[in-house]
Image (cartoon, rainbow, N blue to C red):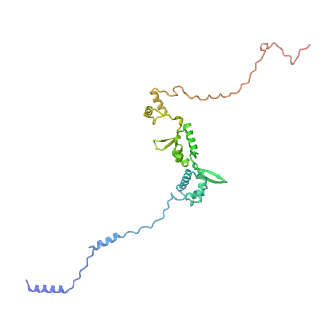
Amino acid sequence: MDPALLKEREAFLKRAKATPAVEKRKSKSGNDGNDKKAKKAKIKPPTPKPVNTVDYKLSQGSSQYKFGVLAKIVKYMKSRHQTGINDPLLLEEILDETNQLDITSKMKHWLLTESLVNNPKIVVVKEDGVSKFCFKPKFDVHDKKSLVKLLRSHDLHGRGGILIDDIEESLPNMQKVLKTISDYIIYVKQPQNKKEVLFYNDRYCRFSVDEEFQKLWRSVPVEGLDDQKIEEYLNKQGITSMEASGYKKVSALPRRKKGKQKPRSFKKHNDHLEGVLQDYTENPPGK
């Protein structure tokens, strides 16, 4: 190898050793560009301040709010009646009991003059010129005697039974009363809506029916059939109805209308001597 080149190489190495070297520190993430992007991604946008929204359906001027106040009053008056208390109350007393004293004067005027007066479940009682209100049940029953009388009346007039819900609305402490008259009532559950109906249990109609007749009775489906189709079915089976057998309801005879009265004609006597006799009343004969 050329000695001149070797000398230059040795001089270069000496200069390189004499010059201090500075190393750059590496970032922990390894990439400055990625770190900046990550920092930008972590920054969340500022959340907007909440805006005060008004629910117009629940505001005091809306119809939903008005009828909500009315429904709360009726519900309270009903529950009060079911506990045996039904004395009339002032509107301010009702609002105090239902925690609704913050309503406006316009709402109070609507309750006094329209909603409570025209409500079928509320009765208005006038005392010294002041209107008071109490609950109006569907039936006027207050004890076991009045309930038995009501059920007996429905049975005699063919009106059937009464819903338990209507009795519970009308009669305070219903369950206690029903236990005391268990011998006079019968429970029947409606198949379509599973509601219970209360019937009067007439002791004069208590008799046992043979099981064979019960099976025959239940084997004939009559749901969805009107009276005409039932009558046609009976005629096909050789069974005639009461109307076809001649048992018809006799209606009252119509009254005869009075016509105009004709002038009465009187019978004349001595008609056979007409034209023979002479009348001397005006010109009496001379002597």
Answer with left or right where residue 231 lies relative to residue 32: right
Q: Camera-side residue: 133 or 39?
A: 133
Identify which residue is drawn at 65% across, 52% down: 126
- Find residue 123 and report its horizontal and vertical position in percent: 60, 50
Q: Camera-side residue: 199 or 232?
A: 199
Q: Quadrant of the N terminus?
A: bottom left
- Find residue 25 and report its horizontal and vertical position in percent: 26, 78
Q: Quadrant of the C terminus?
A: top right
Q: Camera-side residue: 250 or 99?
A: 99
Q: Is residue 61 above or below residue 34?
A: above
Residue sitting farthest toward the right? 287
Identify which residue is drawn at 18% across, 85% down: 17
Identify which residue is drawn at 29% across, 71% down: 34
Answer with left or right where residue 126 lies relative to residue 30: right
Residue sitting farthest toward the left? 1
- Number of marks in the rendered image: 0
- Find residue 84 and report its horizontal and vertical position in percent: 57, 51
- Find residue 121 and report its horizontal and vertical position in percent: 57, 49
Q: Is residue 18 above or below residue 116?
A: below
Q: Is residue 66 above or below residue 177?
A: below
